Image (spheres, rainbow, N blue to C red):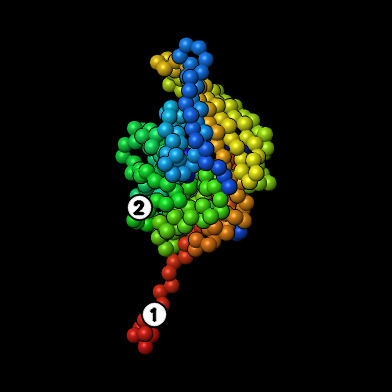
Amino acid sequence: MTGHSILEEDSAPAPRYPRRHLGEGKHIRGSVGEFGPDNLQRTTQRIAFFGEAGKLMYDSDIADIWDAVYRGRGRNYLTEAEGVAELIRQRQPAAASLLDVACGTGAHLSCFTTMFENVEGVELSEGMLAAGRAEWPTLNLHQGDMRTFDLGRRFDAVTCLFSSIGHAATTDELDRTVNRFVDHLNPGGVVVIEPWWFPETFIDGYVTGDVVHDAGRVIGRVSHSTREAGASRVSVHFLVADAEKGIQYFTEELIITLFSREEYEQAISRAGCIVEFVESGPRGRGFFVGHRASPVNNPTDEQAA
């Protein structure tokens, strides 16, 4: 993503990684204000996805609670990373390098370090990068926009997880983003993209909530998701009780595009990959897996002679 999304766990986790088969959002500015009595703070961020405004994403106390919230909600970053590594090695057994785009704090990336010789991450949010560098100082993290980043080198695998691809606002932006992924692949490399819900699988009006206890903090999270034109609006509210900071209240408004399966497949195919869709995955949204063809080594005239 341009930044890891606070995206809904809209269904119970499905069985992990079964056998595969072949196969306009909005930019919104943010605001910050006071709320309620005493020291209760209310921070409202209406998120812009790209450009200078996009750098606001999660540059707040939300970055500090991000991993605690999702681990508390049952996420197992190691298990998820192992499943993605398996998808990669089924197609490229010798894969030794990996780039995770929209890596957030680097929680998945920290697990990939045990599975690949070289791993790096790209993330738009400076707040998420700061949290990741504090937690895993040895990770190689870069600040960048997933539509335009250029590291000047290629990898055996590129991943984009946690439905971060949904921050692309149009099919043109989806094409630009996927092209950036594939341009960073070695010949024979593999790209793994976890999509957001498809238009027919999104649950309009979905609500969910959790309370997480972490290191002396209590974090409450509730959310409400609605359909809006060709996208989904996800409203997320956090209430955090901390011994030192007191009680803080944050809200997030996200517009996440509802691309169709065909639109994802066409974008990956146009970028030069053979595309497959793997159903289920850890959140039931599946994975798109693209395999970049190796160049054909045609014999020279001298060799042919």
Q: Is residue 15 visible?
A: no
Q: Nearer the viewer, residue 76 or 23?
A: 23
> Which residue sits furthest bottom?
305
Q: Nearer the viewer, residue 98 or 102?
A: 102
Camera-side mark, 1 or 2 = 2
SS assignment at label 2? loop
Residue kind at label 1, given as amino acid type: Pro
SS assignment at label 1? loop
Across and down, in percent, residue 76 comes to 49, 36
Quarter assignment of residue 155:
bottom left
Q: Which residue is mark 1?
A: 299
Residue kind at label 2, given as amino acid type: Leu
Q: Residue at x 46, y 44 (%)?
A: 50
Q: Residue at x 55, y 27 (%)?
A: 237
**Could you classify mark 1 by the number of other residues whose Cα lies within 10 Å: few (under 14), some (14-19), or many (20 or more)?**
few
Q: Residue at x 60, y 55 (%)?
A: 263
In the rendered view, would you say 65 is above or below 84?
Answer: above
Q: Which residue is mark 2?
A: 151
**Could you classify mark 2 by the number of other residues whose Cα lies within 10 Å: few (under 14), some (14-19), or many (20 or more)?**
few
- How far separated are the C-alphas under marks 1 and 2? 32 Å
Instruction: Name the quadrant of the C terminus.
Output: bottom left
